[in-house]
């Protein structure tokens, strides 16, 4: 189930023992973060950032 829908469904229900802050980002949010990091890492020119760029490439 989508994290955002789960958050909306459980919002305001005190009988739930679920910690709402423990939910992770949605798939779209994660992909947006990866794309931003790839763009940022692309401005550097050293071996660590090149390896990180390759790892980020595996996400999308």
Image (cartoon, rainbow, N blue to C red):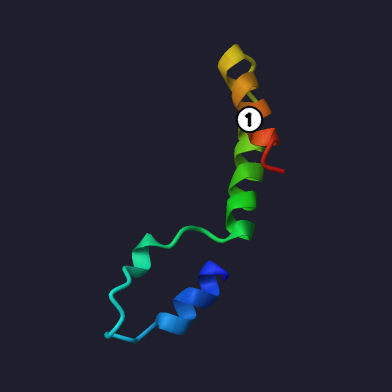
Q: Quadrant of the C terminus?
A: top right
- What residue lies at 48% left-to-right and 80% top-to-bottom? 8
Please tell me whether residue 18 is drawn above or below residue 40 in the rendered image.
Answer: below
Disc 1 on helix, strand or loop?
A: helix
Please tell me whether residue 45 is drawn above or below residue 27 in the rendered image.
Answer: above
Please tell me whether residue 49 is drawn above or below residue 58 in the rendered image.
Answer: above
Location of residue 12 in the rendering, given as x and y in whole percent from the top left corner: 34, 86
Location of residue 33 in the rendering, given as x and y in whole percent from the top left corner: 58, 47
Residue 45 occupies quadrant: top right
- What residue lies at 63% left-to-right and 30% top-to-bottom? 55
Badge 1, how many Cα within 10 Å: few under 14, some, many 20+?
Answer: few
Q: Does residue 40 appear to the left or right of 6 in the view shown?
A: right
- Can residue 41 be seen? yes
Q: How many marks?
A: 1
Residue farthest to the top, as pictured: 47
Q: Does residue 58 appear to the left or right of 37 in the view shown?
A: right
Q: Quadrant of the N terminus?
A: bottom right
Residue 49 occupies quadrant: top right
The residue that label 1 is drawn on is 55
- Can residue 42 be seen? no
Looking at the image, which is closer to me, 16 or 21?
A: 16
Looking at the image, which is closer to me, 3 or 49?
A: 3
Residue 44 occupies quadrant: top right
Location of residue 42 in the rendering, given as x and y in whole percent from the top left corner: 67, 28
């Amino acid at each position: 189930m989508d994290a955002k829908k789960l958050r909306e469904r459980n919002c305001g229900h005190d009988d739930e023992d679920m910690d709402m802050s423990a939910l992770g980002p949605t798939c779209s949010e994660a992909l947006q973060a990866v794309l931003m990091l790839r763009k940022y890492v692309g401005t550097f020119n050293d071996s660590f950032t090149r390896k990180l760029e390759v790892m980020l490439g595996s996400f999308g």
